[in-house]
Image (spheres, rainbow, N blue to C red):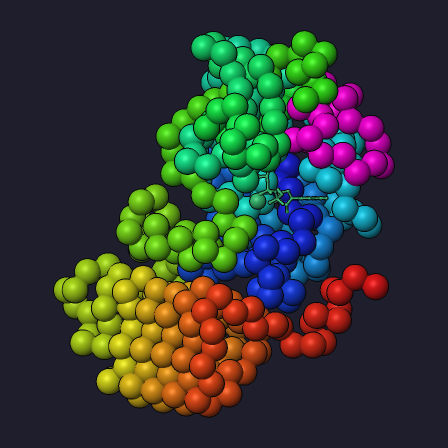
Amino acid sequence: MQAVILVGGEGTRLRPLTYGTPKPMVPLFGVPFLERTLSRLKSAGVDHVILAAGYLPDAITRHLGDGARLGLKLTYVIEKEPLGTAGAIKNVEQYISGPFFVLNGDVLTSLDLRKMIEVHEKRGGLGVLHSIRVEDPSAFGCVVRDETGRVKSFIEKPPRETAPTDEINAGTYLLDPAVLEAIPKDTNVSIERATFPKLLAEGKALYAYLSDDYWLDVGRPDQYLKAHRDVLDRQLALDPLADPEMHRGAFIFAGAIGAPSNIEPPVFIGENVEIAPNAMVGPYTVLGDGTRIGPNVVVRGSVLWDGVHIEEGAHVTDVILASRVRVGKLAQVGAGTVAGHDQHVEPGTVVAPDSRLPATQAEQAAVAPT
Ligand code: GDD
Ligand code: MG
């Protein structure tokens, strides 16, 4: 079985994290998000994954190589210009040899992909779309279906008041290769705005598989933080302890038992982390490998990547700090702040809530549109 993962987006909503790291390589408990998706595909019987990439592809190929480490065959297809979600699928056509999965690269879900195969075998048609219910469908593709699951219409990101349903496109499809015939070559095409509506207008059959699985698009900072919180709360079975990748010397404090007095669980701590005895870390905090937390520091509700250093007396709450960020003595970093790689917060600074502290200028220049 084959799967295409769409990993070519620029991850603009996750900037400045995505200046230096493409969205699929953004870590979830120290492991690139994409690697977690690949493991899920592998356990559902997928053996060949085609990565439709474009933005910072080298970071992906360098880390995953030919996929042998994960027991998968990986093929990379790099777009020179973004081809859109359908254009990117058309662009990998030569590798497709039967019904195939397509996954948005930024979705964290407990969906059992085998259920999609069952629906496809039972219903036939050109494809199955995973859908879930959300409170506000306006940020997603709305999937209107009848009682048999057949999709009646697909409306991408409608204004909230006009949304026809609360059932949305969850970003996993099982498609018949015939869908490729509906997509023009070498053209930027959106599967949500063009291909699905076109197929439906032609009377082609697509089916929705509505499930109540855990589901989250991690493409925004608040959702990225929520993903970590939900895993620490064990809302989905991405149990850091059960996952061997995760076990590499890292540990998690799920409850008060065994946690030192400077840790308030649940907290995940990477390798070679130093925490001063009178610091306070947690709850809902993730410390990447090599993090150093100084005396009298308070860190709450935050995700810190590798090599972050928080100096004496600084306070950080509900923030994301990319690799090697340094927060100076007595600085305070407000909730919702996201700091890019190597950012330094000067001692004593008060950073307003929801700030975006850019990555280094060199990194920004490397990706800034000319
Ligand atoms: N290869 C490639 N080329 N990939 C792309 C391109 C492109 O030009 N544009 C976007 N992608 C990838 C992104 O990297 C991401 O993994 C996926 O396609 C979806 O793009 P997003 O930018 O994250 O879309 P969205 O979150 O606004 O909306 C999509 O996901 C929702 C669910 O999270 C749509 O599919 C919605 O219908 C859906 O509800
Ligand atoms: Mg998204």
Residue 72 picture location, percent across and down? 58, 43
Residue 33 picture location, percent across and down? 51, 52
For residue 25, which quarter of the picture?
A: bottom right
Viewer-proximal residue, 302 or 102? 302
Horizontal side, residue 117 vs residue 86: left or right: left
- In the current view of this chain or complex, which residue is farthest to the left? 257
With respect to residue 53, does 122 lie above or below?
Answer: above
Residue 257 picture location, percent across and down? 14, 64
Q: Residue at x 29, y 86 (%)?
A: 296
Horizontal side, residue 168 vs residue 49: left or right: left
Residue 292 picture location, percent across and down? 40, 81
So how many labels did they put on this image? 0
Q: Residue at x 72, y 20 (%)?
A: 198
Residue 28: tell me if it is visible: yes
Q: In which of the image's four quarters is ligand 2 placed?
A: top right
Position of the C terminus by quadrant: bottom right
Viewer-proximal residue, 261 or 339? 339
For residue 133, which quarter of the picture?
A: top left
- In the current view of this chain or complex, which residue is farthest to the front? 161
Q: Which residues are magenta?
A: 177-196
Q: Residue at x 66, y 61 (%)?
A: 59
Q: Residue at x 36, y 79 (%)?
A: 315
For residue 294, which quarter of the picture?
A: bottom left
Residue 308: tell me if it is visible: no
Residue 195 highlighted magenta (yes or no): yes
With respect to residue 140, does 332 lie above or below?
Answer: below
Type of secondary structure dominating the magenta stretch:
helix
